[in-house]
Image: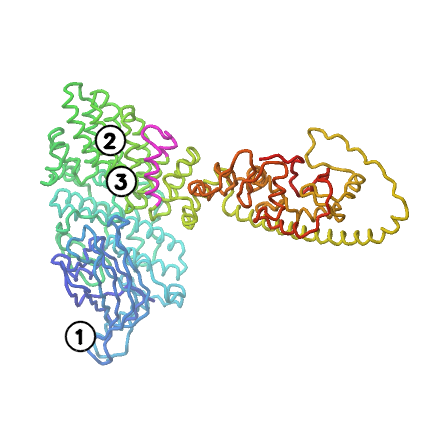
C-alpha cells in the first residue's frame, strides 16, 4: 500500500542564506522551505534521494505564497543494476510538468498545493524549477517551495542474508506485516483485508497527505497516526465500540492539532519580533492546552499501552461545549488566524532558523527540563493535570503594552500622534487586533466627549481620526472594521454638525474614506463586503454629506478595466442601487451614469457586464432614446456583437418595435403571401382569357340568328341613387352590368371593344390600358394621373416615400435629401399636370392626360402607349358608367388638372 516516503535533499543549484534546501527535509507548521538565491539563473534544480528504490505514486508540491515559479518539471532518476546508488550515477526520465497560478486573486496570501499522480520507479526525484511570476512582493526574482511530499511503495530486493542492513530491513518488514505493538508484544495475524485497508491496494491515507502535516501540530499528528492504526486493528478484531471511540477521538484531535499549529506559529512570530514575554506566555498556553486535551479525550487509555482493555468512556459532546481557560485568554489576545500564510511587509524580515530533523518527518519537540527528548511513540503521556501556574506568570501578556512603532510608521502617523498621543496610536498600529479595536474605541470616546471649543482644533482632530478610520476600514479583522465604521458614522452625523465643520473638510473626509470602502466592497469575505456597500448607501443619506453629492460623484467615476472582477462588480451594484434610490438626482446625471456604464461594459468579467446591462436597460426604460447617444450606432456592424445586439433588441422591445428576428419572419411570410397572390392572379387571368375566347365564339355563332329576329330595345334600369356614405367602389346588379358591357367601352382610355365584358375589362385594365399602371410597391393597378398621390397616401409602402417640394413627385426617403440638394428635377408648374413617368409638365385641360399618355408624340416612358397605338380604334363616345374592378384604385370620373 502506498505510504509517505522519507527523503533528504542531496543537491540544489542555489539557495537563500536563510531558507536553505535542507529545510525541505521535514514538514510542519513551522517549516520554512527552500528559496532560491537572489537574481538567480533559471531553471533551478533540486534533487532528493528517497529512502530506497521505490515506486512513486503521488508527488505533492506546496508553493510559496508570492515567490512562485511559472512551471515545475519532474524527473525520476534510477541507477543501473549493480551500480552504487550515488547522485552522479543516476539516469533520469522526464515525467512531465505542472504550471502554477500567479496567485493575484488571493492577494498573495494563500499557498498553492499541487498534487501529481504518477507511476514511476527510481531512487531520485529531480525538480526543474522555471522562472518566477512577477509581482510587487518578489523584489529579487526568486522562487520558493515550502514543502515536498512523495508517496509510494519501497521496492525490496533479495540481498545477502548476512548483510546487517538487509537483516534490519527484514526485521522492519516482519514487524509491519504482523502489526507488532511494541508495548504489547502480542502479534496479530495479518488479515487479507488489511492490505490496502479493506482490499484497496492503491488507497492513500489522508494522514500521508502533505496538507495534514503542514497544518497539524507534530506531536498530535503522531498520536493521530497511532490511533488510526489502532482503529484498523479494532475493526479487524470486530471491536466496533472501541473503533467508534477512536474515530471520534481522531476527529477531535485533528481540530486541536490545527489550533496548536496556529499557536506555534504565533509563538514563533513573537520570537521573531523579540517579544519574549508574549512567546513565554504562548508556550505556557500551548502546554496547558495540550495536557488538558489529553486528559479530556483520555488519549492514554485509548492507545492501550498496557494491552487490550476497555478504556474510560469519553464524553465528546461535553468536550465540544467546553472552552479551555487558557484558550479564552488566547482568543482575546490574538486575532483569529486564517489558514493562509501571513504576508510580510518586507522579505528581509526573516524567520529564525528552525531545528533540523530526519528527512520527511517533523522537527523534534523541545526536550523537557531535566532530561533528553523522548520520541512521542515511546513516551508515556501524562494523565494528571499539573497545578495551575501562578497568576503573575500569565499576567504580562494580558497587560502588556503594544509593540513600538517603526520609524516609517511614526512619520506616517505624526499628525495622529500629535492629536491622540503615542500610546493610543501605537495600539492602532499593533499586530494584536484587540489593541487596534481598543484604539478606535478610545478615539470614538474622545470625539464624543470633546466640548465645543476652537473650530480649528476640531478640524485637526477630525483629520487625525479619518486617518485612523482609513486604516481600520482596511483591517482584515471584522471587529476592527466595524469599529472604524462606527467611528466614521459618529464623525459625519454627530461631530460635524456639533462643531460646524466646513463643507470642504466634509467632502475631503468622504472622498478619502470612500476609496477604502470601495476596496472593502470587493473583499472575498461576504460579511465585510456587504457591510461596506451598506455603509456607502447610508453615507450618501447623511444630512451633512448629501448636499455635497460627493458619494454619487465618486461612485460613477469610470473604473479601470484592470480592476479585479469582484471589486468592479461591487462598484456597479452600488451605482445600480444609488440610481434606484435617487434616480437622476443628487449628483447622478445621464451623462456620468452612461460614462460609467460604457467603460464597465468593456470589462472582461461577465458578472460586471451583466450588472451594467441592467443599469442601461433601466435607464432606457426611464429616459428613452437619449441613452442611444452614448452607444455605438444601431447598424448591422454593431449588431454582430452579441452584447450590442441584445441591448438594441431590448430597446426595440421597449419601443414596441418588432425585433430583427420578428421582422425577418414577417418578411418571409409577406413574400410567401405575395407569391401566392401572384400565382392565384395568373391563374385567374388564364381563366378569364379562356372564358373570353369561349364567349367570342358563341357571339360569332349567334350573329346570323340575331339579324333575322328584330331586336327589342329595353330601357336601361335606373341605378339606385348612391348614398354619401357608400364606398366609391360601387356594386351593380347583373342586368345593369350586362347592358353596360354591350357598349364595350373603357372609362379610362375610351377604347371600344366588343371583348370588353366584365372579365375582358379586367384583362384590359391589368395588361394594356395606357392610362393605368401597376404600383411597383403594392402591385395595385392605379391611374397614372393619380400615381403620386397613391404612393404618398394609399400605398402600403407610403412610409418609405416623401414628397419633393420642387417637382412634387414621390421620392424614396433614403434618396430624398440628396434629390432635393441636387436640384436637377423638373419643377412642377401651377395649373399644369406633372407626369410621374417622364417627369414632364403637360397641359391641364381635360384631355391633357390622354394626349400625353396615348398619342404618338406622348410619354416615351409609358410602355402601354405603343400597345394602344397598334390597335385599330373603334371610335365612339367617351366615357361610361363602368366601375373598375376591386383591384383597381377608382379614379374620379371627371378629369381635372392636378
Q: Secondary structure at mark 2?
A: helix
Between 876 and 482, the one lying in front of the other is 876
Check disc 3 and report the residue beneath it: 519
Q: Earlier in the sequence, mark 2 or mark 1?
A: 1
**Chief secondary structure of the magenta span?**
helix
Image position of 593 with respect to 88: above or below:
above
Nearer to us of marks 2 and 3 is: 2
Kindly indicate the quadrant of the structure image that contains residue 496. Answer: top left
Check disc 2 and report the residue beneath it: 510
Q: Residues within 10 Å of mark 1 (few under 14, many from 20)?
A: few
Q: Is residue 585 magenta?
A: yes
Look at the image and give the residue range highlighted in magenta: 577-601
Q: CA distance from mark 2 to mark 3?
A: 14 Å
Kindly indicate the quadrant of the structure image that contains residue 459. Answer: top left
Q: CA distance from mark 1 to mark 3?
A: 54 Å
Q: CA distance from mark 2 to mark 1?
A: 67 Å
Residue 157: numbered disc: none
Amino acid at each position: 500500500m502506498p505510504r509517505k516516503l522519507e527523503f533528504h535533499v542531496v543537491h540544489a543549484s542555489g539557495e537563500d542564506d536563510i531558507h536553505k534546501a535542507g529545510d525541505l527535509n521535514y514538514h510542519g507548521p513551522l517549516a520554512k522551505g527552500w528559496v532560491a538565491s537572489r537574481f538567480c539563473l533559471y531553471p533551478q534544480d533540486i534533487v532528493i534521494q528517497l529512502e530506497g528504490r521505490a515506486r512513486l505514486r503521488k508527488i505533492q508540491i506546496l508553493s510559496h505564497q508570492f515567490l512562485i515559479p511559472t512551471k515545475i518539471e519532474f524527473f525520476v532518476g534510477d541507477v543501473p543494476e549493480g551500480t552504487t546508488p550515488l547522485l552522479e550515477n543516476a539516469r533520469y526520465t522526464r515525467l512531465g510538468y505542472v504550471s502554477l497560478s500567479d496567485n493575484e486573486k488571493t492577494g498573495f496570501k494563500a499557498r498553492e498545493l499541487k498534487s501529481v499522480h504518477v507511476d514511476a520507479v527510481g531512487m531520485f526525484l529531480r525538480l526543474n524549477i522555471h522562472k518566477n511570476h512577477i509581482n510587487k512582493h518578489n523584489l529579487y526574482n526568486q522562487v520558493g517551495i515550502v514543502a515536498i511530499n512523495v508517496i509510494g511503495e519501497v521496492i525490496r530486493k533479495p540481498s545477502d542474508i548476512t548483510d546487517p542492513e538487509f537483516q534490519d530491513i527484514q526485521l522492519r518488514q516482519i514487524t509491519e506485516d504482523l502489526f507488532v505493538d511494541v508495548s504489547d508484544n502480542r502479534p496479530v495475524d495479518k488479515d487479507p483485508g488489511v492490505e490496502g485497508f479493506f482490499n484497496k491496494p492503491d488507497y492513500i491515507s489522508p494522514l500521508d497527505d502533505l496538507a495534514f502535516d503542514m497544518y497539524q501540530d507534530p506531536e498530535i499528528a503522531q498520536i493521530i497516526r497511532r490511533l488510526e492504526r489502532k482503529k484498523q486493528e479494532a475493526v479487524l478484531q470486530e471491536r466496533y465500540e472501541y473503533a467508534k471511540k477512536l474515530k471520534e477521538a481522531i476527529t477531535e484531535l485533528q481540530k486541536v492539532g490545527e489550533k496548536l499549529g496556529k499557536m506555534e506559529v504565533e509563538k514563533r512570530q513573537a520570537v521573531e519580533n523579540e517579544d519574549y514575554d508574549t512567546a513565554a506566555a504562548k508556550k505556557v498556553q500551548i502546554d496547558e492546552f495540550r495536557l488538558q486535551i489529553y486528559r479530556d479525550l483520555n488519549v492514554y487509555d485509548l492507545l492501550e499501552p498496557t494491552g487490550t482493555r476497555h478504556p474510560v468512556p469519553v464524553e465528546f459532546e461535553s468536550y465540544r461545549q467546553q472552552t479551555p481557560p487558557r484558550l479564552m485568554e488566547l482568543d482575546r489576545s490574538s486575532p483569529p488566524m486564517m489558514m493562509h500564510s501571513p504576508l510580510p511587509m518586507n522579505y528581509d524580515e526573516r524567520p529564525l532558523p528552525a531545528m533540523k530533523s530526519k528527512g520527511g518527518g517533523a522537527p523534534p519537540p523541545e526536550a523537557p527540563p531535566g532530561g533528553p527528548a523522548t520520541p512521542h511513540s515511546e513516551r508515556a503521556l501524562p494523565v494528571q493535570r499539573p497545578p495551575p501556574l501562578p497568576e503573575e506568570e500569565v499576567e504580562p501578556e494580558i497587560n502588556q503594552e503594544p509593540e513600538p512603532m517603526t520609524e516609517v510608521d511614526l512619520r506616517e502617523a505624526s499628525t495622529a500622534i500629535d492629536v491622540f498621543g503615542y500610546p493610543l496610536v501605537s495600539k492602532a498600529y499593533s499586530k494584536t487586533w484587540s489593541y487596534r479595536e481598543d484604539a478606535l474605541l478610545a478615539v470614538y470616546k474622545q470625539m464624543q466627549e470633546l466640548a465645543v471649543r476652537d473650530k480649528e482644533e476640531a478640524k485637526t482632530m477630525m483629520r487625525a481620526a479619518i486617518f485612523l478610520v482609513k486604516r481600520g476600514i482596511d483591517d482584515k479583522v471584522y471587529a476592527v472594521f466595524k469599529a472604524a465604521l462606527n467611528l466614521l458614522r459618529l464623525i459625519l452625523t454627530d461631530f460635524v454638525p456639533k462643531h460646524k465643520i466646513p463643507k470642504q473638510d466634509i467632502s475631503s473626509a468622504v472622498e478619502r474614506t470612500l476609496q477604502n470602502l470601495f476596496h472593502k466592497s470587493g473583499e472575498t469575505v461576504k460579511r465585510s463586503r456587504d457591510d461596506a456597500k451598506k455603509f456607502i448607501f447610508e453615507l450618501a443619506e447623511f444630512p451633512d454629506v448629501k448636499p455635497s453629492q460627493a458619494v454619487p460623484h465618486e461612485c460613477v467615476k469610470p473604473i479601470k478595466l484592470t480592476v479585479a472582477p469582484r471589486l468592479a462588480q461591487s462598484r456597479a451594484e452600488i451605482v445600480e442601487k444609488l440610481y434606484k434610490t435617487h434616480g437622476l438626482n443628487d449628483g447622478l446625471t445621464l451623462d456620468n451614469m452612461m460614462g460609467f456604464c460604457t467603460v464597465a461594459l468593456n470589462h472582461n468579467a461577465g458578472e460586471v457586464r451583466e450588472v451594467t446591462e441592467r443599469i442601461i436597460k433601466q435607464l432606457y426604460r426611464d429616459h428613452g432614446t437619449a441613452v442611444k447617444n452614448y452607444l455605438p450606432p444601431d447598424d448591422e456592424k454593431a449588431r454582430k456583437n452579441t452584447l450590442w445586439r441584445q441591448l438594441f433588441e431590448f430597446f426595440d422591445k421597449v419601443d414596441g418595435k418588432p425585433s430583427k428576428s420578428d421582422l425577418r419572419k414577417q418578411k418571409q411570410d409577406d413574400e410567401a403571401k405575395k407569391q401566392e397572390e401572384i400565382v392565384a392572379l395568373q391563374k385567374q387571368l388564364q381563366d378569364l382569357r379562356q372564358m373570353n375566347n369561349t364567349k367570342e365564339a358563341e357571339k360569332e355563332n349567334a350573329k346570323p340568328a340575331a339579324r333575322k329576329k328584330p331586336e327589342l330595345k329595353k330601357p336601361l334600369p335606373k341605378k339606385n341613387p348612391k348614398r354619401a356614405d357608400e364606398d366609391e367602389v360601387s356594386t351593380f346588379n347583373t342586368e345593369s352590368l350586362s347592358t353596360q358591357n354591350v357598349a364595350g367601352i373603357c372609362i379610362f382610355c375610351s377604347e371600344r371593344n366588343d371583348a370588353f365584358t366584365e372579365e375582358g375589362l379586367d384583362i384590359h385594365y391589368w395588361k394594356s390600358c395606357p392610362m393605368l399602371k401597376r404600383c411597383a410597391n403594392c402591385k395595385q393597378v392605379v391611374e397614372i394621373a393619380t400615381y403620386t398621390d397613391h404612393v404618398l397616401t394609399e400605398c402600403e409602402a407610403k412610409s418609405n416615400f416623401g414628397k419633393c417640394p420642387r417637382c412634387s413627385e414621390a421620392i424614396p426617403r433614403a434618396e430624398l435629401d440628396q434629390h432635393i440638394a441636387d436640384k436637377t428635377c423638373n419643377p412642377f408648374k401651377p395649373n399644369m399636370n406633372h407626369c410621374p413617368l417622364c417627369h414632364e409638365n403637360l397641359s391641364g385641360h381635360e384631355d391633357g392626360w390622354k394626349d400625353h399618355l396615348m398619342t404618338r408624340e406622348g410619354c416615351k416612358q409609358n410602355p402601354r402607349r405603343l400597345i394602344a397605338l397598334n390597335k385599330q380604334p373603334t371610335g365612339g363616345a367617351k366615357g361610361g358608367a363602368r366601375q373598375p374592378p376591386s383591384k383597381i384604385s377608382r379614379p374620379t370620373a371627371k378629369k381635372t388638372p392636378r
